[in-house]
Amino acid sequence: MADSASPPNPARRLARRFYLREPERVAAELIGCMLVRHTSLGWIGGRIVETEAYLATDDPASHSRSGLTNRCRSMFSQGGTLYVYTIHAKFCLNVVTQPTGIGSAVLIRALQPLWGLVQMQVHRGIDDERQLARGPANLCRALGVTIAQDGLDLVTSDELMILKADWRASKTPAVALETFELGVGPRIGISRAVDLPLRFFVRGSRYVSGPARLRN
DNA sequence: ACAACGATACCCT
DNA sequence: GGGTATCGTTGTT
C-alpha cells in the first residue's frame, strides 16, 4: 500500500498549551492526532488510535507513583516532553502532560500507519500494515524510537512531533471517514488500578491493540 | 496449542 | 526501592 496522498504538515503541530492539561483530557483529545517522525529517509508515522492516561496522584499504575526517579525523570518535565521507558528490553513512548514537576503522561499505544510504511516494515520485520504500530512496544519499533529520544520536546523538535487531528469525535458510530467514535475503558496490561477508565481508542478500528472485545 | 506481547517481576547497586 | 531483563500471560488460528 502506498503512503497517504498528502504529506504531514508540520504547521499543524500541537502547541504547548494542549499538553498542559489533565492527562485524561489530553489522552482523549490525542485520538485522531498524527504522530510523526522526520528522518533522512522521509516521514514515518500515522494517526493515533489508542492512548492511556497515567495520573500524577492516586494512580498505583503510574511510574510517577514513587516520585521523581532516574527512570521516570522526564515524566516530571513540562507537558509536551517525550517520556520513553524500557520494558522487557523494548521501549514504550509517552507524552508528558501538565506543567513541570507534576508527573503525569499519556502512553501512545497504537497508530494507523499513514507515512513511511516501507520504513516501518523494515523496522518491524513484518509486512502486515495492521500490525506495524499496534501495541506500544511495536509502535516504538516501527518508528525507530528508543530511550535515545527520551526527554525530547515534541513542541520544538524537528525530529518528532504530534499534529492536529483531521478527524472529529462523533457521538454516533462513524459513517464518514472524517469522524470516529471515541471508546473509553480500563487500561490494558496493568495489575493495579485495573478499573480506572483511562484508556481511549477509536471504536472499531482494526489498528487498536488488545483483544477484540476491548476494541469495540 | 502456539504465537505474540509487554506501566512486570526481580534481584541488587 | 529502582533499574533492568526475554518469560509468563493472554488471545487468536
Image: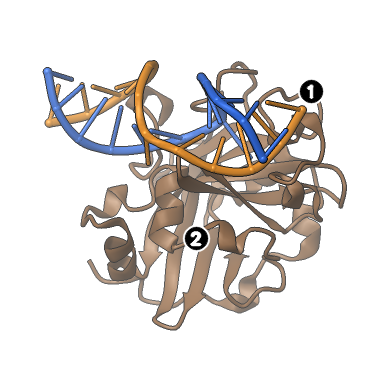
Chain colours: A brown, B blue, C orange
Quadrant into which the C terminus of chain A falls: top left
The x and y percentages for residue B4 are 28, 38
The x and y percentages for residue A84 are 60, 51
The x and y percentages for residue C10 are 37, 20
Report helix, strand or loop for mark 1: loop
Q: Nearer the viewer, residue A85 or A199?
A: A85
Q: Nearer the viewer, mark 1 or mark 2?
A: 2
| Residue that numbered label 2 is attached to | A145
Report helix, strand or loop for mark 2: loop
The x and y percentages for residue B8 are 53, 23
Residue A116, numbered circle: none
Relative to residue A66, is residue A147 depicted above or below?
Answer: below
Q: Nearer the viewer, residue A194 or A16?
A: A194
Look at 43% across and 52% down and name the residue there. A139
Amino acid at pointer 2? Val
Q: Is residue A138 left or right of residue A109?
A: left
Judging from the image, mark 2 belongs to the subunit labelled A
Real-space CA distance between mark 1 and mark 2, rounded to the nearest whole angstrom: 29 Å
Which badge, 1 or 2, comes first in the chain's sequence? 1
Judging from the image, mark 1 belongs to the subunit labelled A
Q: Nearer the viewer, residue A167 or A43?
A: A43
Quadrant into which the N terminus of chain A falls: bottom left
Look at 67% across and 65% down and name the residue there. A154
Relative to residue A4, is residue A78 depicted above or below?
Answer: above
Look at 71% across and 68% down and name the residue there. A155
Label 1 neighbourhood size at 10 Å, few (<14), some (14-19), many (20+)? few
Look at 75% across and 54% down and name the residue there. A19
Label 2 neighbourhood size at 10 Å, few (<14), some (14-19), many (20+)? some
Amino acid at pointer 1? Asp
Q: Is residue A104 left or right of residue A196?
A: right
The reply to whether residue A120 is visible in this rendering is yes
| Residue that numbered label 1 is attached to | A58
